[in-house]
Amino acid sequence: MEKDLLKQGKSFINDFKEFISRGNVFDMAVGVIIGTAFGKIVTSIVNDILMPIIGVIIGGHDFSSLSIEIGDATINYGMFIQNVIDFLIVAFSIFVIVKIVNTVTHKEEKKKEETQPKDEQVILLEEIRDLLKKEKKTAKTKSKTDK
């Protein structure tokens, strides 16, 4: 029984070591750290730039101080609005970054496809496709001239 527990423990530790030593764990850690720093930047943009501008537009109010008191509870809906704006800015920024990365990746994949030599079967199939398209166009023009 003790041997089984030791065996399971060693297996668990080995699995954990393998998990930690993979590159994607380190990539994930870097992503979390960068995401945290990016979140601070966005929070600063919202708190220090956007919210004062929005406050001036709505009559000089400070969004973060907007709240409602119900009995002993205080509902800080201004902070909620500020956090929603934070989220939208982060989501939009990530969307733009992903869009750029996908565009670059797609261009690289297309270049790879263009530079790879085509298989003989693929070439034959493309020729057959082109002949069928040409034949279809010819048949359409004949039918129009026959009418």
Image: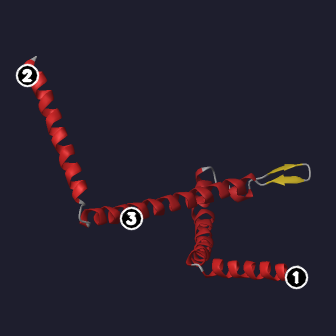
Q: Position of residue 67 (x, y in %)?
A: 78, 52
The mark lying in front, picked from 2 and 3, is: 2
Q: Position of residue 31 (x, y in %)?
A: 58, 73
Q: Secondary structure at mark 3?
A: helix
Q: Residue 56 versus residue 24: which sits nearer the camera?
A: 24
**Can residue 70 be seen by looking at this rendering?**
yes
* Amino acid on which the number 3 mark rests in the picture: Thr
Image: 97 above or below 56: below
Looking at this rendering, what residue extends furthest in the top direction?
147
| Residue located beneath label 3 in the image | 105
| Residue located beneath label 1 in the image | 2
For label 3, count other residues whose C-alpha is less than 10 Å away and answer few (under 14), some (14-19) or many (20+).
few
| Residue located beneath label 2 in the image | 145
- For the point 31% across and 61% down, the residue is 110
Looking at this rendering, what residue extends furthest in the right direction?
72
- Specify which label sits upstream in the sequence, 1 or 3: 1
* Amino acid on which the number 2 mark rests in the picture: Thr
The mark lying in front, picked from 2 and 1, is: 1
Q: Is residue 115 left or right of residue 16?
A: left
Q: Position of residue 120 (x, y in %)?
A: 22, 58
- Specify which label sits upstream in the sequence, 2 or 3: 3
